[in-house]
Image (spheres, rainbow, N blue to C red):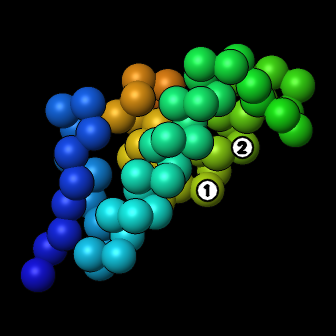
Amino acid sequence: MSHSWTLNGRLIHLNSSSDRAVAQRVALHMQRRIAEDDWRPYATRADALKAWIRLGGIRLQVLRALGLVDGSDAGSHG
């Protein structure tokens, strides 16, 4: 059974139903960072995104859904 969640019209693919809570938490966290322009512990937004892109997975899908990165930024992670 596949699991998914939609954020900003983008489908977030999840491995299990419990991953939905993780995706929602990541989305809220990223939305707060955007609103507050808070990228700590990184010096810049670009530095933060570069580090988070490397993590891939749900975080990367959320970053894409929020328009923080696109497919060309993300390389083969995901």
- In front: 33, or 2? 33
Residue 27 in view, yes or no: yes
- Left-right relation of 65 to 11: right
Q: CA distance from mark 1 to mark 2?
A: 7 Å
In the rendered image, the vertical position of residue 66 relative to residue 10, given as above or below: above
* Mark linked to residue 55: 1
Residue type marked 2: Ala
Q: Secondary structure at mark 1?
A: helix
Which amino acid lies under the numbered mark 1 shown in the image of this protein? Leu
> Which residue lies at the image location 22% right of the left edge and 38% below the top edge?
10
Q: Quadrant of the C terminus?
A: bottom left
For residue 19, what is the image quadrant? bottom left
Mark 2 — residue?
51
Please tell me in which quadrant of the rendered image residue 16 appears: bottom left
Q: Is residue 45 above or below residue 1?
A: above
**Label 1: few (<14), some or many (≥20) within 10 Å?**
few
Find residue 14 and report its horizontal and vertical position in percent: 30, 66
Q: Nearer the viewer, residue 11 or 38?
A: 38
Residue 11 in the image: state x and y as whole percent.
Answer: 21, 46
Quadrant of the rendered structure where residue 30 is?
Answer: top right
Query: Callout 2 environment at 10 Å: few (<14), some (14 to 19), or many (20+)?
Result: few
Using the image as rendered, state which of residue 43 and residue 74 is in the foreground.
43
Q: Residue at x 41, y 24 (%)?
A: 67
Relative to 10, 20 lies left or right: right
Contact? badges 1 and 2 (CB < 8 Å)? yes
The structure residue drawn at horizontal position 51% and vertical position 50%, both measured from the top left corner, is: 26
Residue 75 visible from this viewpoint: no
Left or right? Give the position of 59 relative to 44: left
Residue in the image at 22% along x and 54% along y: 5
Q: Quadrant of the N terminus?
A: bottom left
Estimate the x, y position of residue 40 in percent, counting from the top left. Answer: 84, 34
Element marked by disc 2: helix
